[in-house]
């Protein structure tokens, strides 16, 4: 477990040092490095306080991604226009966050039902239903028909 924490801390340090070296002006660079060092310290405290299961999930979340070729193909199929690389990256990131929210809600539902083990499809369906009712998905169950009868 300590090796996983050490790897995550090293990865956080590498990311913060890489982003601080890209700043152009001196005063903006100092402000940015101060913010990044604060964020890095917060992340280290957070990672240190995670349990073993939470740390494994966090590491899996950090490594996971949606294949950009498939995202591009799906967007192109829906819109008829090939998306740019930046658009594809943004959409895959948004999808990853959405899946993470659904999984977190599913785990909360599983805990409320006093069940253990992996989440099941019933937990995911219930999570999506609750998120839809709260308006977090942007998808309504009942869609209004835009066509009017003559």
Image: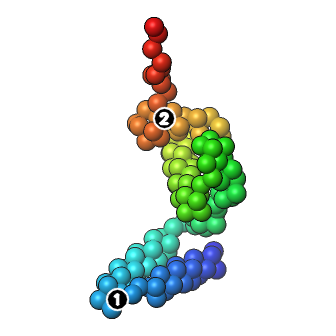
Q: Quadrant of the C terminus?
A: top left
Which class describes the residues within 10 Å of circle 2: few (<14), some (14-19), or many (20+)? few
| Marking on residue 25 | 1
* Image location of residue 101, percent across then percent down: 51, 50
* Image location of residue 49, percent across then percent down: 47, 70
Q: Is residue 58 left or right of residue 150?
A: right
* Nearest to viewer (mark 1 / mark 2): 1
Q: Vertically, is 126 above or below 63?
A: above
Q: Is residue 19 visible?
A: yes
Which class describes the residues within 10 Å of circle 1: few (<14), some (14-19), or many (20+)? few
Q: Is residue 52 visible?
A: no
> Number of marks in the image?
2
| Marking on residue 87 | none
Q: Which residue is mark 2?
A: 139
Question: Which image quarter: residue 41?
Answer: bottom left
Q: Which is more N-terminal, label 2 or label 1?
A: 1
Q: Vertically, is 28 above or below 149?
A: below
Helix, strand or loop status at disc 2: loop
Q: CA distance from mark 1 to mark 2?
A: 43 Å
Residues under numbered marks 1 and 2 in contact, where contact means CB atoms less than 8 Å apart: no
Q: Vertically, is 113 above or below 87?
A: above
């Amino acid at each position: 477990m300590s090796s996983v924490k050490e790897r995550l801390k090293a990865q956080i340090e590498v990311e913060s040092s890489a982003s601080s070296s890209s700043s152009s002006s001196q005063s903006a660079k100092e402000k940015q490095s101060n913010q990044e060092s604060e964020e890095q310290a917060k992340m280290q405290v957070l990672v240190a306080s995670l349990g073993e299961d939470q740390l494994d999930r966090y590491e899996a979340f950090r490594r996971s991604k949606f294949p950009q070729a498939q995202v591009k193909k799906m967007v192109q199929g829906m819109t008829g226009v090939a998306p740019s690389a930046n658009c594809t990256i943004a959409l895959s990131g948004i999808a990853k966050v959405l899946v993470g929210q659904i999984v977190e809600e599913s785990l909360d539902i599983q805990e409320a039902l006093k069940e253990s083990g992996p989440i099941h499809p019933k937990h995911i369906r219930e999570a999506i239903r609750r998120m839809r009712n709260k308006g977090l998905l942007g998808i309504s169950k009942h869609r209004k028909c835009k066509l009017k009868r003559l």
